[in-house]
Amino acid sequence: MHLEPTAAAKPKVVIIGAGFGGLEAARALRKADAAITVIDRHNHHTFQPLLYQVATATISPADIAWPVRSILRRQENASVMLGIVRGIDTKARVVEADTISLPYDYLVIATGVTHSYFGHEDWQNGAPGLKTLTDATKIRSRVLLSFERAELAKNEDDRKRLLTFVIVGGGPTGVEMAGAIAEIARQTLRFDFRHIDPRAARILLIEAGPRILPAFPEDLSAYAEKSLRKMGVEVMTSTVVTDVKRDHVMLGMRRIDSEAIIWAAGVKASAAANWLGAEADRAGRIKVGADLSVPGHPEIFAVGDTATLATPIPGIAPAAKQMGKYAGEVIAARIAGKTPSQPFVYRHAGDLATIGRKSAVVKLNKLKLTGFTGWLFWSVAHIYFLIGIRNRLMVAMTWLWNYLTYQRGARLITRDDRPE
Amino acid sequence: MHLEPTAAAKPKVVIIGAGFGGLEAARALRKADAAITVIDRHNHHTFQPLLYQVATATISPADIAWPVRSILRRQENASVMLGIVRGIDTKARVVEADTISLPYDYLVIATGVTHSYFGHEDWQNGAPGLKTLTDATKIRSRVLLSFERAELAKNEDDRKRLLTFVIVGGGPTGVEMAGAIAEIARQTLRFDFRHIDPRAARILLIEAGPRILPAFPEDLSAYAEKSLRKMGVEVMTSTVVTDVKRDHVMLGMRRIDSEAIIWAAGVKASAAANWLGAEADRAGRIKVGADLSVPGHPEIFAVGDTATLATPIPGIAPAAKQMGKYAGEVIAARIAGKTPSQPFVYRHAGDLATIGRKSAVVKLNKLKLTGFTGWLFWSVAHIYFLIGIRNRLMVAMTWLWNYLTYQRGARLITRDDRPE
């Protein structure tokens, strides 16, 4: 213990959001002589890259979630608050949440994204998106319930509709969802029904652009598409969704009946830009300067999916982490009376997406991996980045078990997730 | 493959409920030349003895749940339906569910129990009970949220109320909940907060009778009470709850402020007796004959918590299993044209309840175990009775991890479980 000035004298840093960006910002400030508060609407950090595995009944919500206050328990200059931020008073420098008002000297906004239906917000009920654990268990229930209800269907039309799964959006999440649902239908449930053959399920992956996985090189996109087709997924590129209802989706004049439509197509930033009255791009991301601060507010930083820079940065976890770390370091430097470091430079490590059992596509600099090698790399990378020994062990074991048995251990339909 | 009569000619057996009793009945019929249908409102069997561990954030819902159709996948004469039974037409011999009508030649009712508030059903909101996974995650959220809200509390009264946990009912569930919440407060959360000391939490276990664990010998009850007191639980015996509200509980003239009140006091049988118009005891359990059939209906059997016999049988998993097995065997014998076996005889294997880390009470015939030995026995027995390798492995590993680190891996507050 060394003598410290009173708590009141310490600069107050508020970090909104305990995702990848917010947590890295807090960690970068661990040695700062500051009073840091991390506020989030959830009590847990969610490892979003594996959300689709919760949605497809492989792992449990707790396997990819960790209490924020547990993550920061040893960082004595940080405290954690549960609350939903309603606004920011930039003049008084106060964050207003439902539970508390938090004055700040420095502010980091790391509030991430939510689904965007490109102006068709009424599509949400028909095609839920996948951003939180609640979303994931809801989609899980919807997918599993479709098979259950098909087993009980009284006619062929109902059965066909209930065995049709539509995934909108051919990015990594869409590809991963389509592959996983194909595996559920073809392998996991194979012997479980008496009146339907789950292998007859139709799985459609719909992408508006000319190819799936547009962030990847063309040959990897083609490889992923071929792999999905082999697994029985109908990949429809250059196909635009024009309407979504609870029981069907329209592709121009074409109607596809389905009660399990999943939205993996678009995201928009949280309301943070509105809180600040700051300039944002079309997706709602705040335009930040080279040091990630908000123009006119050198004390406010936006990181991860909440921010947009002159050079585009992909909306992936490593980018959010780098930005969070950078913002934390700038604040720490200023608190210490030093000149902050160089402008933020994003370093792209690579792109990876898994397609299914023993298959993934990986692009790291000049290295490209596909098939089993890609899948192994993908698996190890994801386990490595999970927080906590327990989660790593549990997920690794679950994957091994799933790999050996084709079974999925989290096939739960919970009452609250039953559809209307 | 041998030649079989057409499916229509086979006797139809309907089993309502995929708990311990219903599943054992289905298994006992595995060689019967019958068409068996198991219908349940959930898609999964729940291992209720460990529900309290879900409610106290140790394990995940999926760890103690297994899809019913997965359990019966290899039993070709059995099919599984998801549906909520609304009534039984005993004349036409049809079970009416929301999703389907099921004709039967033999019927097994294994619908279990729900909470009973002894006529005060309005207490439910203030003091939720613990019978399903949804109940468990709701209680988990309520307990964890209490600590979160205490951290944000603006005055001492609020803080005190939010750090008071009341468990009503001193049976095994109540004892296990009280012990686990004490561990969460004293160990798990110890370093996680900045404004409160979780160790200051007050945990009350309230029992109307003169001692906790009334099914156990007196010395084991006394041991359990002493152990709980050592862990900081206030055990109040001969204390009757006279009112429950969302933020307090009344014990006669005494008021205890708490927003985390848990009901582990009473159960009542499902509506099955009403469906049949059959005679029931005060808890709603159907009075069955020596062969577990309903008087006047030799084709209808009630098992587990749905039934009551001349000699009382405890409402525990082994009893439900024995009854389910017996009913299945009687039906199988009748289908095979044989004379059914002897009257049902319940064999009591013993009683066990865990109190906390390294402590449990076990009573098996003349054998009594306490402390670490009891706890080891309790752990092994519960893992043994879990369904599936995966669940056994996951739960065993989670317990080991919890034992070594004092941490709990499922500290999730999910949005849907947030209180009103």
Image (cartoon, coloured by chain):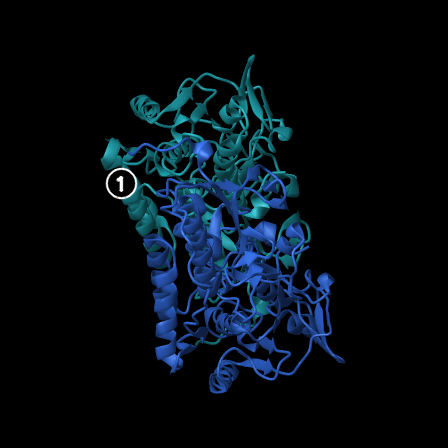
Chain colours: A blue, B cyan
In this view, the residue farthest toward the top is B253
**Residue B168 in view of the camera:** no
- The residue at the point 24 percent across, 35 percent down is B372
Residue A277, given in percent of the width and then of the height, sits at 67, 53
Q: Which residue is mark 1?
A: B377
At horizontal 57% and vertical 24% (from top left) the residue drawn is B248
Residue at the farthest right position: A253
State the image coordinates of residue B206 (x, y, percent, origin top left): 46, 23
Which quarter of the figure is the N terminus of chain B placed in? bottom left
Is residue B273 positioned above or below A264 on the image? above
* Nearest the eye: A143 or A341: A341
Is residue A88 depicted above or below B214 in this figure? below
Q: What chain letter is assigned to the residue under label 1?
A: B
- Estimate the x, y position of residue A71 in percent, counting from the top left: 39, 47
Left/right placement of residue A30 relative to residue B101 reads left
- Which residue appears at 61% of the width and 84% of the height? A210
Q: Quadrant of residue A382?
A: bottom left
Packing grade of label 1 (10 A; few <14, some 14-19, many >=20) is some
Q: Mark 1 falls on what kind of element?
A: helix
Instruction: Give the vertical position of B353 relative to A225 (above or below).
Output: above
- Amino acid, disc 1: Phe
Q: Is residue B228 visible?
A: yes
- Quadrant where the C terminus of chain B sits is top right
Quarter of image, res B188:
top left
Q: Which one is nearer the viewer's eye here, B290 or B248?
A: B248
Left or right placement of residue B212 versus residue A292 in this view? left
Q: Is residue B363 above or below residue B89?
A: above
Q: Position of residue A96 (x, y in %)?
A: 61, 41
User: Is residue B403 found left or right of A70 in the rendered image?
Assistant: left
The answer to which of B123 and A62 lies nearer the viewer is A62
